[in-house]
Image: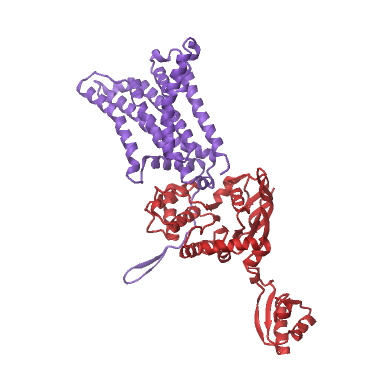
């Protein structure tokens, strides 16, 4: 930048400079897109109205944890909320959260006709879908995992011997992280898939919420219809995200009442298959001509 | 397949064909476009947007090959997209984001690190005239400002070549003039190659050095726009008085000349040029015959002439109507 100084000031010539710095690869672009999508979904650097829904949902998810830790602080040894119960308690919030952020992350690109801009850059269509899944998964983790981890921390710190309690609870922490991650990417993938078919966010929000509700009714109806065939009935959970998550959480935390009939590995396989099917469908969908 | 050395060309295509069902959008298009500001002209449905999409890797051809900046546009699309920028025709901007955030994000999408992306976004928005407005939400921008943001995102990663699809769409005369000024600057001062797809002949004539005319999926013309400026261009001559002695003298020196207009009315001629000796011969013939030389300039063919020859009068009438509307 050149400058000519004068008595009263300086005039700077901001001539165009060519860029000679590094150009990073696809992983950088994927992370940048995931980060941008997350910020956009949370309303960061946007108007205040865009921030309301996510913040309300975060607040709502924090309430049961705050109450549980508060009671534990005043009544030592009293635990009324275990981890599977908390996962179940916040499932509805997580579902609404996904129904809110997934359309914001992917429908708005279609609505604003940004896809030609993305796909005319080095990032490919596969990377685009992976970035969106990464963003949706991480963002959902913040509401599906953080409250449960906070409860685990609260339980540990409020015990008589915090360090020992936390060491002994590391197994629980591992299970919490696995459950939170599976829930986040599973619901995130479903939410993204539904949202990817429309550029209208309100439609996507409605279809996602309706889909969660109807899928549970459908699973219930089919299980009733197949009452005399227990081999089939025990698999009807795959039709409903809420039942799938409940089965996975109960299996992971050893609640045999729900999970005895279905191996935990099979539940994980079902969830992984759903994530894979959602991704493959989106790959095919975005590979179409623009 | 197109050769990938492409040292002197920005775009090369070889028998490039694209069919949508029974509709042929591009029909065995062969091009070798030099590194210049290139105008891509043609009526609606000529195949301009299809060609751009194939060159950007947004669409796959039915057959044939294409190279951009010497890289295979079909087999190595990611590398091509690393080197080019694209300003689409449609309004493709997120209303709820600031111009700085959006342009910076697009820079990161092209591989620039976060900090460099923000710096580049600020620089480029300054150069397109949006320095003051860069922290405002795009939703509040006028059409002209939105076009500038689109231009900024197309050049933020410092591409070698930028594809501009109808960049003056929807702009008022002043906005159009400013946009064309920016595009001229991008090419002439910043050294970025430009491919300008447009319906408007004036836009191409003002900005471009080379023109490709497409008509119904075929190449109707592909040539320098200002060939007349070359030393090789023929000469347009007008003299006062009887032209015959003047023309005889030229013929005696082996220089061919033909009437420039309707023969029996014309005192103007197109003289075939063969280096500077032709200029000397015209000067001498004028002096020897006592015929004052009233006009001596390269024999120009306007872009409109070229377009008429290539596409036909119907298309020109359409373009004129579009231009009238644009004004």
**Viewer-proximal residue, B270 or A157?**
B270
**Viewer-proximal residue, A30 or A88?**
A88
Q: Position of residue A276 (x, y in %)?
A: 52, 29
Residue at image coords 48%, 13% = A226
Placement of the N terminus of chain A among the 4 image quadrants: bottom left
Q: Quadrant of residue B215?
A: bottom right
Rendered position, A262 above or below B241 = above
Residue at image coords 68%, 77% = B236
Residue at image coords 70%, 81% = B267
Rendered position, B68 above or below B204 = above
Q: Position of residue A162 (x, y in %)?
A: 27, 23
Q: Position of residue B73 (x, y in %)?
A: 62, 48
**In the orientation shown, which residue stands out farthest toward the top?**
A228
Q: Colour of chain B?
A: red
Q: Position of residue A203 (x, y in %)?
A: 43, 37
A14 left or right of B180 in image? left
Residue B8 visible (yes or no) = no
Q: Quadrant of residue A289?
A: top right
**Viewer-proximal residue, B216 or A273?**
B216
A86 left or right of A134 in image? left
The mark tally for this picture is: 0
B164 left or right of B94 in image? right
- Tell me which colouring the rendered structure shows: by chain
Q: Which chain is rendered purple in the image?
A: A
Residue B269 visible (yes or no) = yes
**In the orientation shown, which residue stands out farthest toward the left?**
A74
A139 left or right of B289 in image? left
Placement of the C terminus of chain A among the 4 image quadrants: top right
Residue at image coords 54%, 47% = A120
């Amino acid at each position: 930048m050149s400058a000519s100084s004068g008595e009263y000031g300086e005039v700077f010539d901001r001539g165009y400079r060519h860029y000679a710095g590094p150009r990073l690869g696809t992983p950088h672009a994927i992370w940048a897109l995931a980060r941008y999508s997350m910020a956009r979904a949370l309303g960061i650097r946007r108007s205040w109205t865009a921030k309301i829904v996510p913040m309300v949902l975060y607040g709502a998810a924090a309430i049961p944890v705050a109450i549980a830790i508060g009671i534990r602080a005043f009544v030592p040894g009293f635990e009324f909320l275990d981890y599977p119960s908390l996962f179940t308690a916040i499932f509805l919030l997580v579902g609404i959260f996904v129904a809110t952020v997934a359309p914001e992350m992917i429908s708005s690109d279609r609505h604003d006709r940004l896809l030609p801009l993305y796909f005319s850059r080095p990032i490919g269509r596969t990377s685009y879908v992976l970035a969106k899944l990464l963003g949706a998964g991480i963002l959902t983790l913040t509401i599906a995992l953080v409250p449960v981890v906070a409860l685990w921390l609260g339980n540990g710190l409020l015990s008589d011997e915090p360090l020992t309690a936390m060491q002994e609870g590391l197994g629980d922490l591992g299970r919490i992280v696995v459950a939170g991650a599976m829930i986040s990417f599973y619901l995130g993938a479903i939410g993204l898939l539904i949202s990817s078919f429309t550029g209208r966010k309100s439609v996507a929000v409605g279809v996602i919420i309706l889909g969660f509700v109807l899928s549970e009714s459908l699973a219930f109806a089919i299980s009733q219809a197949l009452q005399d065939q227990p081999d089939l009935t025990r698999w009807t959970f795959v039709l409903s995200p809420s039942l799938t998550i409940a089965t996975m959480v109960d299996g992971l935390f050893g609640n045999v009442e729900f999970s005895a009939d279905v191996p935990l590995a099979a539940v994980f396989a079902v969830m992984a298959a759903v994530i894979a099917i959602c991704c493959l469908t989106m790959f095919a969908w975005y590979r179409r001509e623009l | 397949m197109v050769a990938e050395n492409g040292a002197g060309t920005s775009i090369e295509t070889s028998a490039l064909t694209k069919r949508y069902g029974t509709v042929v959008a591009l029909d065995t298009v062969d091009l070798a476009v030099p590194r210049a500001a290139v105008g891509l002209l043609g009526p609606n449905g000529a195949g301009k947007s299809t060609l751009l999409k194939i060159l950007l890797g947004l669409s796959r051809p039915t057959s044939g090959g294409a190279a951009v900046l010497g890289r295979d546009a079909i087999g190595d699309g990611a590398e091509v997209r690393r080197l080019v920028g694209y300003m689409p025709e449609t309004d493709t901007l997120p209303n709820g984001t600031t111009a700085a955030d959006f342009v910076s994000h697009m820079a990161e999408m092209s591989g620039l690190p976060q900090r460099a992306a923000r710096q580049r976004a600020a620089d480029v928005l300054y150069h397109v005239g949006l320095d003051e407005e860069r922290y405002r939400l795009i939703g509040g921008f006028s059409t002209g400002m939105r076009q500038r943001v689109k231009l900024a995102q197309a050049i933020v990663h410092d591409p070698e070549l930028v594809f501009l699809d109808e960049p003056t769409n929807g702009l008022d005369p002043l906005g159009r003039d400013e946009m064309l000024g920016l595009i001229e600057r991008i090419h002439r001062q910043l050294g970025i190659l430009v491919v300008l797809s447009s319906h408007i002949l004036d836009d191409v004539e003002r900005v471009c050095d080379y023109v490709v005319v497409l008509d119904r999926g075929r190449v109707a013309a592909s040539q320098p726009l200002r060939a007349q400026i070359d030393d090789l261009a023929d000469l347009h001559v007008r003299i006062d008085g009887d032209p015959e002695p003047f023309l005889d003298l030229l013929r005696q020196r082996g220089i061919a000349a033909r009437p420039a207009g309707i023969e029996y009315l014309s005192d103007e001629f197109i003289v075939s040029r063969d280096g500077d000796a032709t200029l000397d011969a015209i000067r001498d013939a004028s002096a020897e015959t006592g015929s004052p030389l009233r006009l001596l300039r390269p024999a120009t063919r306007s872009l409109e002439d070229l377009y008429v020859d290539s596409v036909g009068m119907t298309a020109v009438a359409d373009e004129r109507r579009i231009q009238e509307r644009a004004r």
